[in-house]
Amino acid sequence: MGSPARSKGLSVQTKKYLFCYIGLLPVVALFVWLRINPLVSTIKLSFYDWNLIKAFKPFVGLKNYVRLFNDKLFILALRNTAIFAFATVLIGIVLSLALAVALNKPGKMNGFYQTVYFLPVITPMVPVSVVWKWIYDPGYGLLNYFLSFFGIKPIGWLMYPNIALISIIIMCIWKAVGYNMIMFLVGLKNIPSQYYEAAAIDGANGWEIFRSITLPLLRPIIMYVFVTSTIEGFNIFTPVYVMTTGSQGAPGNAVRTLVFNIYEEGFRYFKMGYASSQAVVLLLIVLGLTLIQLKFLGGDDVGASVQ
């Protein structure tokens, strides 16, 4: 009597697993088609001299990758992208964490401030870039108009190579700080108050409480924000394309980024094979940085980190 019952139980369990797998199959198939298939095709294209307007597309092996590191535009784009990502990630995280800590304290206007800081996040990047391009305009921009009250002459914020990239960095930090702030704020509100009460009884000051309690317990949120911000930083394209093409473009490719370089190689010069090799390098860089961040920010159980 026990054996048939056990067999019947296993059969029900198997049906449950089968139902789950069948339910997930369309989602997995769609993910493979939309994500994995283009990724594999890009890697494959990177080994060919694949030109959109030429019928002959020969296999060239690693020639595209060797060419990359002799390409001054690629090196410049990689340097600009690294600077952009480094600045937006570090400054943006520090600023958003400081805002979250400030807004975590009781206050009647906290909801209003959270809304104000979050509004840029839900605004599409293209109109935001257009507005900031007008703000930075050397002739009739709002920023130069404000600075004129202090006797400062108009500055071509997007035209001078030394400040063009910095101007875009400022705009992107402004747009993303609200999202990261909300992430940190959610983490802060989930920290039990008993930790802070015990630390206060032990005589810990504000910095010691922040360093020994708040930061360790926020580590999963910090890791998430670091990883997503790094990925977004290395994939910067829209602000560069919208804000620096045309009359306000900085000379000497001062704001050329890696994704913008990939776009030009692939869709302006039709060198899809060469553009694909750059995309693969970008993938490897982002993947490597993500693994490093997961290693150093993941660690053991965050609860064990509270001292």
Image (cartoon, rainbow, N blue to C red):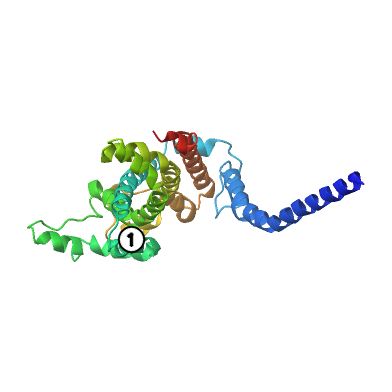
Residue at 42% across, 50% down: 190
Q: Position of residue 146 (x, y in %)?
A: 14, 62
Which residue ends up furthest to the right in the rendered image?
A: 1
Residue at 8% across, 58% down: 150
For residue 242, which quarter of the picture? bottom left
Q: Position of residue 18 (x, y in %)?
A: 77, 53
Residue under label 1: 114
Q: Is residue 179 left or right of residue 107?
A: right
209 vs 184, nearest the viewer: 209
Helix, strand or loop status at disc 1: helix
Count of marks placed on residues: 1
Which amino acid, mark 1? Gln
Task: Evaluate whether residue 211 shows in this view.
Answer: yes
Which residue ends up furthest to the left in the rendered image?
A: 151
How packed mark 1 is, by other alpha carbons closer than 10 Å (few <14, some 14-19, many 20 or more), is: some
47 vs 21, nearest the viewer: 21
Task: Evaluate whether residue 73 shows in this view.
Answer: no
Q: Is residue 38 left or right of residue 142?
A: right
For residue 19, which quarter of the picture? bottom right
Q: Position of residue 267 (x, y in %)?
A: 48, 55
Q: Position of residue 229 (x, y in %)?
A: 41, 48
Which residue ends up furthest to the front in the rendered image?
A: 201
For residue 128, which quarter of the picture? bottom left
Quadrant of the rendering where the C terminus is positioned:
top left
